[in-house]
């Protein structure tokens, strides 16, 4: 017991000296006597006495004392931290700030910045200021906000959109001063000028770093290893004590759970640095043991790139194929949907539409810049650049990919050489009439995921037809909790009857982030009837903050795009397709055909693809007809049996009515726990390493529906707390009013009592006067 107590005392001393080096020095800081460290004079004792004590003490008592010593050390450290944080002399910055409660109303409050905390008062505490609220900075971030008014504006927000406020005040206040309603997950502040604002920004960044260090003042692994060594030594010296192995294992399990709980709390939720690229030998063993569970991938074949540089997709129709087009046109009429029309194979691109959608992610490494940027405007610019990077690849000629059959799936991944990570792409055709495609893209290690649903439509207008991609994609930055809703342009093909077959992109698309209120409007312009080659593939766009335009850009989406700053009119190259950019395209890895399932795109359409590449249109048409007839047969069988078909990878969220991937994991990457990601049977999994299990590997596959339910429970709890606070405030107001009424009634009763007492004192004189008055009247009457 003495040994374990001294061990815990040494840990407390180390953590105390650590805090003394971390926090600023103040002359007025004095640690109270009850928090002083114990004297280490009792470190030496007789070994014979120790052995006798160990032999006389049961093993479970030793474990119990060891755990109690650990708890005492933890309580001492917590008390010392609590004292330092509550010490009024430990203040980093204190000044007036304006905080925003609603969109229009600002409240002027006195802010006090302490290590890990930011306290808000109606007035300075020296003037008996009433406490308003306390912000916990341990899991927050700070950034500058653009402002139309004078002063310097910055924002403090929680990365996972959780509450940033404490439940009680510095003096255990239950309710703060009445102010405008303040946001739960963030706070926008305004300093008087830029100098003061920069000072606040620097101080906040410093105290956030310090608070993250204060969360883990000592290594739990060291404590755990030391605890096991001491316990093993005590057990080895005690041979005469009888205790069951089950009790020992139970006690050891409880100790591990307690240490793991402390370790989990101390893990920083912000995005860690990528410097620790080396993994332990245990992590390497985990990777080797799980390689057999991975789906094997190989490098995909080289891509075929079309002509670049303001060039439209054109094709000359051969003479033998013109009759097929005329035969096709006789079956359609203007305004008709072409989704049910069987197209000839000579206009087909030898791959599925599911695979074609993956072309937009060859430059998904651009999203790493958005994830690592602290400025929301820069994040929006980077995401717009990533969006534009997916269009310049054009197939040779005017081609259309295969229409996916019901239940068709496709999978691949893109290799990031910089950080050795993988961006997985999964897609499934969940409906054939109408044709609906769902896709999911994920790279938790880089901090982003994309999922969306697209309804493909086609309209015939006589000499032209349009392929419309109706739907949205949701890009999520995991570490920031920001969602960007993205739409797609349509493809216009003209020259079917008159002129040359030409395809262009057209329409207006948007990229919107509701959290930061930044948005981008992009317009793809069709070439006018009169104009030269320079009017091909034109694009124009704007980046806004609500209704204010900050940037404009224009150019050609397959060549060069110029960005213009509306404030300074400065121009810069926003995006340009060069040979260097083309060489930087991420390598795509696919599953070998022999390892693919029967409903995967490449294996399903391999005979049609082979025939098209051999220019055998008859064989391609035959093989395509076999696939279509098989799909019709399965559809008829389901109608007869009454069995409904359900998607394998996606399901609809009953709350948002959106299609989501069944195994979505939106947790930010944790370098302390997460090792790598891999795919098995269309499930993207994460290898994790936990110290709590002897087998340190488990596969985490968290459904986004569970996360959504957790968020709903949190929202319900917050709303319940808010309603309870409102009820208590109303009760307090009613109690004050009732007290005032009671005081008024007491005053009235006291007045009536005094008046009655006066009348009672004068009643004999009044009676005497009345008798005299009556006697005078009687005397007058009888006179």
Image (cartoon, grey):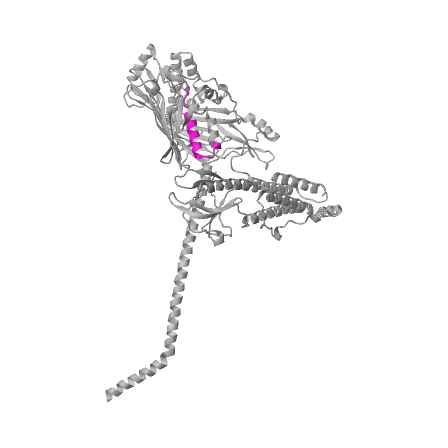
Judged from this view, the residue extending furthest toward the top is 319
Magenta residues, start to end: 371-393
Q: Nearer the viewer, residue 223 or 243?
A: 223
522 or 644: nearer the viewer: 522
**Image coordinates for residue 546, horizontal then vertical, percent:** 37, 36
Residue 460, position in %: x, y? 30, 21
Q: Quadrant of residue 483?
A: top left
- In the image, residue 660 sits, relative to residue 186, either above or below, namely above
Which quarter of the image is occupied by the C terminus?
A: bottom left
Let me know if residue 751 appears in the view: yes
State yes or no: residue 349 in magenta.
no
Residue 557: quadrant of the picture: top left
What percent of the width, then of the height, locates residue 405? Answer: 40, 23
Residue beneath the point at 70% across and 49% down: 41
Q: How many marks?
A: 0
Residue at the spot 29% in from the left edge and 86% down from the top edge: 775
**Seen in the image, is 314 located left or right of residue 713?**
left
Q: For the stretch drawn in magenta, what is the main secondary structure?
A: helix
Can residue 681 be seen?
no
Q: Is residue 163 above or below residue 175?
A: above
In the picture shown, does residue 451 fall above or below 739? above
> Which x, y percent locates residue 366?
46, 27
Q: Quadrant of residue 292?
A: top right
Question: Who is closer to the viewer here, 710 or 342?
Answer: 710
């Amino acid at each position: 017991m003495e040994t374990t107590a001294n061990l815990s005392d040494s840990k407390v001393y180390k953590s105390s000296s650590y805090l003394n080096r971390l926090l600023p020095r103040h002359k007025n800081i004095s640690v109270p006597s009850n928090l002083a460290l114990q004297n280490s004079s009792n470190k030496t004792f007789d070994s014979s006495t120790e052995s006798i004590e160990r032999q006389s003490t049961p093993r479970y008592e030793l474990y119990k004392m060891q755990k109690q010593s650990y708890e005492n050390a933890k309580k001492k450290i917590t008390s010392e931290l609590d004292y330092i944080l509550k010490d009024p002399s430990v203040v980093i910055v204190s000044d007036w700030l304006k905080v925003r409660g609603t969109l229009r109303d600002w409240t002027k409050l006195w802010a006090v910045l302490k290590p890990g905390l930011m306290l808000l008062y109606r007035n300075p505490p020296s003037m008996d200021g009433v406490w308003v609220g306390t912000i916990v900075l341990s899991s927050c971030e700070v950034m500058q906000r653009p402002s139309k008014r004078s002063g310097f504006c910055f924002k403090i927000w929680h990365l996972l959109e959780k509450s940033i406020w404490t439940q009680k005040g510095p003096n255990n206040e239950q309710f703060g001063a009445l102010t405008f309603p303040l946001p739960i997950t963030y706070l926008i502040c305004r300093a008087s000028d830029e100098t003061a604002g920069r000072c606040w920004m620097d101080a906040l960044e410093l105290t956030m770093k310090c608070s993250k260090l204060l969360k883990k003042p000592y290594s739990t692994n060291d404590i755990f290893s030391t605890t096991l060594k001491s316990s093993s030594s005590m057990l080895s010296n005690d041979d005469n004590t009888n205790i069951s192995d089950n009790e020992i294992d139970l006690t050891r399990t409880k100790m591990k759970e307690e240490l793991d709980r402390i370790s989990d709390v101390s893990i920083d939720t912000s995005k860690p640095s990528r410097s620790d690229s080396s993994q332990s030998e245990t992590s390497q063993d985990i990777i080797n043991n799980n390689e057999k569970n991975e789906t094997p991938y190989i490098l995909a074949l080289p891509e075929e790139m079309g002509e670049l540089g303001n060039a439209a997709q054109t094709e000359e129709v051969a003479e033998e194929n013109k009759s097929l087009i005329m035969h096709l046109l006789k079956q359609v009429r203007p305004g008709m949907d072409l989704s049910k029309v069987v197209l000839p194979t000579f206009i087909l691109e030898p791959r599925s539409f599911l695979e074609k959608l993956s072309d937009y992610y060859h430059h998904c490494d651009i999203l790493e810049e958005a994830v690592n940027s602290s400025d929301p405007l820069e994040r929006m610019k980077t995401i717009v650049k990533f969006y534009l990077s997916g269009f310049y690849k054009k197939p040779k000629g005017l081609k259309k990919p295969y229409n996916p059959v019901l239940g068709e799936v496709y999978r691949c991944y893109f290799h990031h050489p910089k950080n050795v990570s993988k961006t997985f792409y999964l897609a499934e055709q969940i409906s054939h009439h109408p044709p609906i495609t769902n896709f999911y893209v994920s790279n938790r290690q880089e901090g982003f995921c994309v999922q969306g649903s697209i309804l493909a439509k086609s309209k015939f207008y006589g000499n032209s037809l349009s392929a419309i991609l109706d739907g949205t994609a949701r890009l999520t930055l995991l570490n920031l909790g920001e969602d960007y809703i993205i739409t797609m342009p349509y493809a216009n093909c003209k020259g079917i009857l008159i002129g040359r077959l030409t395809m262009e992109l057209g329409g207006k698309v948007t990229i919107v982030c509701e959290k930061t209120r930044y948005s981008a409007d992009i317009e793809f312009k069709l070439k006018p009837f009169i104009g030269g080659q320079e009017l091909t593939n034109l694009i124009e766009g704007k980046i806004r903050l609500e209704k204010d335009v900050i940037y404009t850009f224009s150019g050609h989406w397959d060549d060069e795009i110029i960005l213009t700053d509306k404030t300074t009119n400065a121009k810069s190259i926003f995006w340009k397709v060069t040979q260097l950019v083309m060489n930087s395209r991420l390598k795509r890895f696919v599953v070998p055909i022999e390892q693919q399932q029967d409903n995967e795109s490449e294996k399903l359409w391999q005979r049609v693809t082979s025939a098209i590449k051999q220019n055998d249109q008859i064989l391609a048409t035959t093989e395509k007809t076999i696939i279509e007839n098989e799909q019709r047969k399965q559809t008829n069988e389901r109608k007869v049996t009454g069995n409904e078909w359900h998607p394998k990878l996606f399901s609809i969220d009953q709350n948002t009515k959106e299609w989501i991937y069944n195994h979505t994991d939106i947790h930010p990457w944790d370098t302390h726990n997460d090792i790598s990601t891999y795919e098995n049977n269309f499930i993207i999994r994460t290898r994790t390493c936990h110290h709590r299990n002897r087998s340190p590997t488990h596969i985490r596959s968290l459904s986004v529906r569970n996360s959504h339910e957790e968020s709903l429970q949190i929202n319900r709890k917050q709303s319940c707390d808010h309603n309870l606070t409102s009820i208590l405030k109303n009760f307090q107001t009613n109690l004050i009013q009732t007290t005032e009424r009671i005081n008024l009634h007491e005053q009235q009763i006291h007045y009536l009592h005094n008046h009655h007492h006066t009348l009672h004192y004068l009643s004999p004189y009044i009676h005497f006067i009345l008798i005299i008055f009556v006697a005078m009247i009687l005397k007058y009457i009888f006179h």
